[in-house]
Image (cartoon, grey):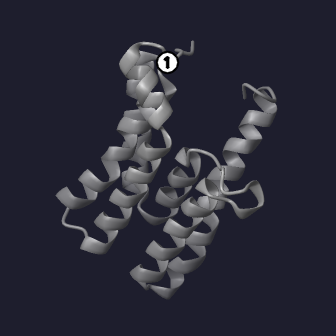
Amino acid sequence: MRAGGRKVGLFTLLADIAKGALPVAATLPFGQPIITATIGLSAVLGHLFPIWLKFHGGKGVATMLGVLLAWQPLAALAAGVTWLIIYRVSHYVSLASILASLVPPILLLANGHHLLEVSVSATLSLLLIARHHANISRLLTGEEPKTQ
């Protein structure tokens, strides 16, 4: 949205969500959790490290949301609500994204999901947090910009 305006930003958001959701949704009829987890992780890794951009991609928030919407919709909803609350209170998009990414693995673990699902969800969260390293530094020094 900063670079191209509201319409371009919304289109990019929806495309990034679809980039995660569609491949994962395509695996669900097969009922193989390992395939679904692998495809979800691959979608996010492809977003974070695209070959055509010399392995310099985005932060993975929307793509991770898409993966979760198709794979673990309740975890996605909980993460979305968490993001909204933290953003409304702090006005930091990065802080909201980082903290919301922690919700799915905790929720899956607490609800007794298979270790594979918890592990992939935790890996996605760690990747997202790692991609926010510069934001974390700015948050800690008080230099991260707020949005309105």
The structure residue drawn at horizontal position 72% and vertical position 37%, both measured from the top left corner, is 10
SS label for mark 1? loop
Q: Which of 125 and 18 is in front in this view?
A: 125
**In this orientation, which residue lies closer to the viewer: 78 or 102?**
102
**Picture coordinates of residue 64, whole percent (x, y):** 51, 53
Judge from the rendering whether residue 20 lies leftward or rightward of residue 94; answer left or right.
right
Q: Is residue 96 in view from this perspective?
A: yes
**Residue 25 screen position, x and y as percent:** 57, 71
Left or right: residue 110 versus residue 88 is left
Q: Residue at x 39, y 26 (%)?
A: 85
x%, y% of residue 58? 62, 46
Q: Name the residue under label 1.
A: 144
* Image quadrant where residue 133 sits: top left
Residue at 71% over, 63% down: 51
Residue 47 at x, y percent in the picture:
63, 56
State whether residue 23 is above or below residue 29.
above
Classed neighbour count for the residue bearing mark 1: other residues with Cα under 10 Å, few (<14), some (14–19), many (≥20): some
In this rendering, does residue 114 appear at all? Answer: no
Which part of the image, by quadrant, shows the C terminus? top right
Q: Nearer the viewer, residue 81 or 135?
A: 135
Q: In which quarter of the image is residue 3?
A: top right
Report the residue that reaches farthest toward the front: 54
Which quadrant holds the N terminus? top right
